[in-house]
Amino acid sequence: MRFGAMCDFCIKHGEGRRWYLSAKNFVNERAGNLWGLSKMAGWVFRMEVKRRWVGWLSRAPRVVRALLKPLVEPLYRAVHFGQVVPIEDIGQILDIVGTIVRLPCVCRWVIKGKEERSCFGVVLGGPEAPFLKAIDPRRWGGPELEGLEVVSKEEAFSIMKRLEEGGAVHTIWTFGTPLIGSICNCQFGSCLGLDTLASGIKIMFRGEYVAKIKFELCLGCRECEKICPFKAIRYNPKLGRCEVDLFRCYGCGICRAVCPSGAITLVDRRSIPAVSDLW
């Protein structure tokens, strides 16, 4: 999907740089409408309804999805949308925010019925920020918790690094765009955001990067091909090496975590004309 609007988005909200690295785009206790944020959190976390919606959407005729696309996508982009972010940018985000709270993943809870603490609420303020209370799992029928689990930046980064090695894609999500309120670690089959992509309706943008494989370093072990959730890496038997399909790559960078020879790097999406506006 091509979005010239994504570049406009960075100019408007990111002052010309990556919008998610600007402190003003994170939820804080002085956000303009905390009541609205709380209501928004309630809307976002009506996940059982969303799970049924995604299931219905995946079975709907293509013509129906095509009709819904221009209606659904702008709504989510204005209210609650995500973007893929590589681990190094996650580290920069953690340096910006003031409080990090580890939470059970609402998608996994609804889809699998399991408590997996793979999501993080983030705010500029302290742990008493109203937004953190608004996303308490008890509000959306999640597991009962004895208070919110506040974690350090180092601990959060370490947890997300381990999740990445298991195939999870890091994403950020807005609660009233452009206010970012959470970092999620997503996998197909247990993430409603990713699963919606299969229907052709996108409520999350690709990352700011694409993967690049250094031919001379590639061993042809195919570990990157196995872990890529977007099927963007394929093995070339004639060359005995793996190649990246730039048009499928979301720039998550998790392929790097399993490459034994360090053959994979991320390059700025905008530096490659063919995919510079493919979001």
Image: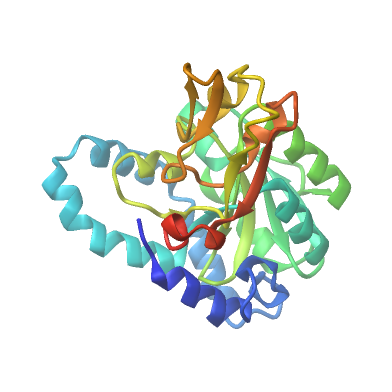
In-front residue for pair 52/257: 257
Q: How is the image coloured?
A: rainbow
Q: Residue at x 49, y 51 (%)?
A: 45
Q: Position of residue 86 (x, y in %)?
A: 66, 48
Is residue 279 visible to us here?
no
- Quarter occupied by residue 38: bottom right
Q: Is residue 177 above or below residue 103?
A: below
Residue 194, given in percent of the width and then of the height, sits at 45, 41
Instruction: Indicate left or right for 80 with 154 as reference.
Output: left
Residue 48: x and y in percent read 40, 41
Viewer-nearest residue: 2 or 74: 2
The quadrant of the rendering that contains the N terminus is bottom left
State the residue at coordinates (71%, 59%): 122
**240, above or below 261, in the image:** above
Picture residue at 58% right of the left edge, 19% below the top: 222
> How many marks can you see?
0
Quadrant in which the C terminus appears? bottom left
Decide if residue 270 is in sight here.
Answer: yes
Q: Quadrant of residue 129?
A: bottom right
User: Residue drawn at (69%, 60%), measured in percent from left and top?
Assistant: 132
